[in-house]
Amino acid sequence: MALIVQKYGGTSVGSPERMKNVVRRVAKFKALGHQIVVVVSAMSGETNRLIGLAKEMQAQPDPRELDMVISTGEQVTIGLVSMGLMQEGLKAKSYTGAQVKIITDSAFTKARILSIDEQNIRADLANGYVVVVAGFQGIDSKGNITTLGRGGSDTTGVAIAAALHADECQIYTDVDGVYTTDPRLVPEARRLKTITFEEMLEMASLGSKVLQIRAVEFAGKYRVKLRVLSSFDEEGDGTLITFEENDKMEQAIISGIAFNRDEAKITVRGVPDKPGIAYQILGSISEANIDVDMIIQNVGVDGTTDFSFTVHRNEFDKAMDILKNQVQSHIGARDVVGDNKTAKVSVVGVGMRSHVGIASKMFRTLAEEGINIQMISTSEIKISVVIHEKYLELAVRVLHKAFDLDQEPA
Ligand code: ADP
Ligand code: ASP
Ligand code: MG
């Protein structure tokens, strides 16, 4: 007997018919003697619909009230899936995040899970129930409903698996695993049988939304066995996230290509080149709870320098506003310019550690297509470039081919 957490995404619970499909799978696992916790997302499109409604009421929806609204999508699916399980003759019980006591911080719309009280779930499982938990939501210490950021049901699934010391956390979605790149953009993309935790962390943080990054972080921290699978296939092993770099001798140097269309670039020009400037620029941005991604500062010339960084496109206007109205004159910068038509493409692979020439191959491949690189950043296992958004698809396709990702590794 194993304890398994199964998370089903929006498409997998997109209609009553699809929910019945979920029910059948859960019943199958239950019949094998396993204990099952099901974590579900809202029906596909529902969270977007709710955000749309909120925006009709208030141009910039109040974050607390927005979470009140968008957390309701998951409450619908937990009830419906539980009903389906009962209809199939199983004992089932649904829980919202607050009912479980998934305690988060108070960062509305992007809250972090602080703790999970797993006592009730354990008791229900011991009594033969399938427990159905709402993904994406929690409650802060003051009792406010919070949500975990888009794609956050993955994180609920992994966090519950960690709290219960589950044998496995299975993420069921609309693709049958993690691919070399998004198969919707590159049809030649291949499913990876395994991917290391480190690589998955990079892929997720660089834009591969197949898993929310915090879910991968949780899996790493608590050593949760994590697998991505298709909710539409009866069979298949999906992709296992591994903690060892086994078989890496035979693996490609690059495991995957991630991309992010939501990048916006900001440059503060003519900044005095002296201590404390980076802090004054980025401190004000972080106080506004805006996440900063790539950061580049030029070598100072004539006592001044340029300072560039990227933020999520949704936060571009807010960040520009802060810099122009609060920071620019305060630090004596010449001006602040921005471009929200940028995108980021990254190649990821642990094999980079032992191979040279990956960066030059990447840059040559892009140059041959006439794609200008605006920013570069590297780590031990990834190289990212910021380019104009209109070249994104082309860049991903040519890099996928250049690094032989469309071929099975020898
Ligand atoms: P769910 O609703 O089940 O959480 P998501 O839409 O959040 O599903 O994530 C699955 C999607 O992630 C796929 O449909 C695919 O388009 C996209 N995706 C992006 N990068 C990858 C990748 N490297 N491998 C597989 N899927 C990817
Ligand atoms: N329903 C939420 C969203 O659309 C959470 C999730 O699906 O993981 O982002
Ligand atoms: Mg998702």
Image (tube, rainbow, N blue to C red):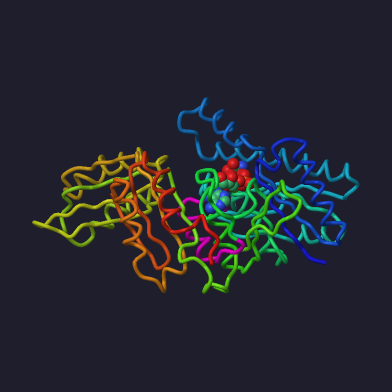
Residue 330, above or below 246: above
Residue nearest the viewer, comparing 274 with 363: 363
Residue nearest the viewer, comparing 202 with 219: 202
Specify the quadrant of the image occupied by residue 75: top right
Give coordinates of residue 339: x percent, y percent. 30, 40
Viewed as shown, does residue 128 lie left or right of 296?
right
Quarter holding the N terminus is: bottom right
Question: What residue occupies the far top of the structure in this picture?
Answer: 56
Quarter holding the C terminus is: bottom right
Give coordinates of residue 168: x percent, y percent. 70, 63
Question: What residue occupies the far right of the structure in this picture?
Answer: 89
Q: Residue at x 56, y 28 (%)?
A: 53
Viewed as shown, does residue 102 lie left or right of 220?
right
Q: Is residue 118 magenta?
A: no
Q: Residue at x 41, y 74 (%)?
A: 354
Q: Residue at x 57, y 68 (%)?
A: 221
Question: What residue occupies the far left of the structure in this picture?
Answer: 302
**Magenta region, residue range:** 193-211
Query: How many numbered dots are placed on residues in this image?
Result: 0
Q: Is residue 205 magenta?
A: yes
Give coordinates of residue 11: x percent, y percent. 66, 41
Residue 148 in view in this figure: no
Specify the quadrant of the image occupied by residue 223: bottom right
Residue 130 in view in this figure: yes
